[in-house]
C-alpha cells in the first residue's frame, strides 16, 4: 500500500522532506502541498508528479490524502495538528509540537479522546545512529548509573533568530534528547546568559546556558550558540558512575599532514542529520502502511518539551530555578 501524503509548509525542511519521500524513501507519494505562500506551493507542486497545490485545510480533509506532514512555522502547528486529529488522520509534525503548553495540552486531550497515537513529533535525534549508540550505552548501564550530561547545540550562523527561538526551536532538541536518554521527566530548569558573542545581535541571548534537573537528580547542561561561525556542531556526553560516553565527531575523515590534523564540520542540520531524517520518516511510513499507529516521539513528548521550554523562559525572566509542571501522563503514552 502506498501512503498518500499531504505536506503543509514547503519551506526549507518541507522541501527537504519531500525530496527524501520522493527520491530516497519507499512506500509513499506526495499528492498535495499547501503553504501560506501560494506561489511557493504551486512551484513545489509542479516538480512532483501527480501533486496538487491546495489550501491547508482542504488538504487535511481531502479523500486523496492518507497522512499529513506539518512543516510550517511553529506557531501554526497546533491548528493543523488539531485539524488532522479532527479528520482522524495520522500527522507527522515537525518540532515544536506547538509553541505554547496550552496548545500541546489541547492536542494531547484530542488524541486521548480518539484513543490512538496519531501524532508523531519530529525529534529526529532519536533516529540518529550516533545518538542511538549513546542511548544504548546508557540504557545497558555499561558505564553504571548516569549522573550528568553535557550537551552543546552550536549553529554556525542564524540570521533573524530571536531569544525565544534559542529555547523553543534550538534547545528543544536537547530537552527531548535528555528525557529520552534517561527515560525520566525534567523537573527543574535554570538559565544563564554569559558574556555576549560579539558576532550576534545585541538583543539575542547568545550564547545561552541551560541547566536541567531530572526526576532522579541527573543534572544536564545545554550550551546553545547561534553564531559560532565555524559550522554546525552537536555534542553530547554522559558522565556516569564508572565512565563516560560521548558522541563522536560526525562522519569525518581526519587528515593528518605537516604536523597538523583536520576534518570537516557539517554546515547545518540537513547534512548532520540526513540519515536520521530518512530513518524517522521511513519508519513512520512503514508503520502506516502496516496499519500501525506511530510509536515515535509523541504528543506527550511534545507537551513535556513545551513545559520545559516554558520553565526555561521563566528562569530567564526571574534568574532563579523554576519547577517544570506536567499533568498526569495519560495511559495512551505509557
Ligand atoms: P521555513 O521558513 O523555511 O518554511 C516554513 C514554511 O511554512 C514557509 O514556506 C512558510 O510560507 C510556510 N508557512 C508559514 N505559515 C504558514 C501557514 N499558516 N500555513 C501554511 N504554511 C505556512 O522554515 P523551516 O526551516 O522549513 O522550518 C519549518 C518547521 O520545521 C519549524 O517548526 C522548524 O522548527 C522545523 N524544523 C525542524 C528541523 C529538525 O531538525 N527537525 C529542522 C529545520 C526546521
Ligand atoms: C532548526 O529549526 C532545527 O530544528 C535544527 O535541527 C536545529 O539544529 C536548528 O538550530 C534549528 O534552527
Image: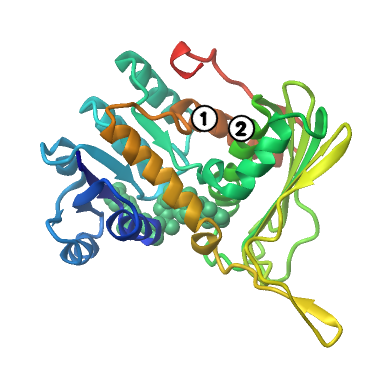
Q: Position of residue 218 (x, y in %)?
A: 78, 29
- Give the labeled residue for mark 1: 301
Residue 331, placed above or below residue 249? above
Mark 1 vs mark 2, CA separation in Å: 9 Å
Residue at the (21%, 50%) spot, across then down: 29
| Observer-nearest of 328 and 141 | 141
Q: Position of residue 143 (x, y in %)?
A: 82, 34
Disc 1 + disc 2, Cβ < 8 Å: yes
Residue 230, placed above or below residue 220? below
Q: Secondary structure at mark 1?
A: helix
- Give the labeled residue for mark 2: 180
Residue 168, placed above or below residue 217? below
Residue 232, placed above or below residue 212? below
Number of other residues with Cα within 10 Å of mark 1, as a class: few under 14, some 14 to 19, many 20 or more:
many
Q: Secondary structure at mark 2?
A: helix
Residue at the (38%, 26%) spot, across then down: 107
> Which of pointers 1 and 2 lies earlier in the amino acid sequence?
2
146 lies left or right of 79: right
Amino acid at each position: 500500500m502506498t501512503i498518500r501524503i499531504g505536506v503543509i509548509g514547503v519551506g526549507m525542511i518541507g522541501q527537504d522532506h519531500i525530496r527524501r519521500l520522493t527520491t530516497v524513501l519507499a512506500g509513499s507519494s506526495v499528492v498535495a502541498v499547501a503553504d501560506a505562500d501560494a506561489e511557493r506551493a504551486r512551484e513545489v507542486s509542479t516538480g512532483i508528479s501527480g501533486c496538487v497545490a491546495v489550501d491547508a485545510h482542504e488538504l487535511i480533509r481531502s479523500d486523496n490524502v492518507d497522512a499529513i506532514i506539518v512543516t510550517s512555522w511553529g506557531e501554526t502547528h497546533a491548528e493543523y495538528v488539531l485539524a488532522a486529529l479532527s479528520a482522524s488522520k495520522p500527522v507527522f509534525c515537525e518540532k515544536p509540537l506547538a509553541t505554547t503548553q496550552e496548545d500541546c495540552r489541547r492536542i494531547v486531550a484530542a488524541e486521548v479522546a480518539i484513543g490512538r497515537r496519531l501524532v508523531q513529533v519530529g525529534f529526529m535525534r532519536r533516529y540518529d545512529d550516533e545518538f542511538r549508540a549513546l542511548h544504548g550505552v546508557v540504557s545497558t548501564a555499561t558505564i553504571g548509573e548516569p549522573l550528568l550530561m553535557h550537551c552543546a547545540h552550536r549553529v554556525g550562523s542564524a540570521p533573524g533568530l530571536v531569544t525565544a527561538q534559542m529555547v523553543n526551536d534550538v534547545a528543544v532538541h536537547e530537552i527531548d534528547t535528555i528525557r529520552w536518554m534517561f527515560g525520566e521527566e525534567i523537573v527543574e530548569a535554570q538559565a544563564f546568559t554569559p558574556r555576549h558573542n560579539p558576532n550576534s545581535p545585541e538583543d539575542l541571548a547568545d550564547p545561552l546556558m541551560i541547566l536541567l534537573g531530572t526526576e532522579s537528580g541527573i543534572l544536564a547542561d545545554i550550551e546553545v550558540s547561534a553564531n559560532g561561525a565555524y559550522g554546525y556542531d552537536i555534542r553530547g556526553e554522559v558522565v556516569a558512575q564508572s565512565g563516560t560516553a560521548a558522541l563522536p565527531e560526525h562522519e569525518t575523515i581526519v587528515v593528518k599532514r605537516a604536523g597538523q590534523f583536520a576534518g570537516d564540520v557539517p554546515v547545518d542540520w540537513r547534512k548532520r542529520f540526513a540519515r536520521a531524517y530518512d530513518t524517522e520518516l521511513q519508519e513512520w511510513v512503514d508503520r502506516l502502511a502496516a496499519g500501525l499507529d506511530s510509536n515515535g516521539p509523541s504528543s506527550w513528548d511534545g507537551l513535556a518539551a513545551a513545559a520545559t521550554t516554558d520553565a526555561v523562559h521563566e528562569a530567564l525572566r526571574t534568574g532563579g530555578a523554576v519547577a517544570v509542571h506536567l499533568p498526569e501522563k495519560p495511559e495512551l503514552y505509557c
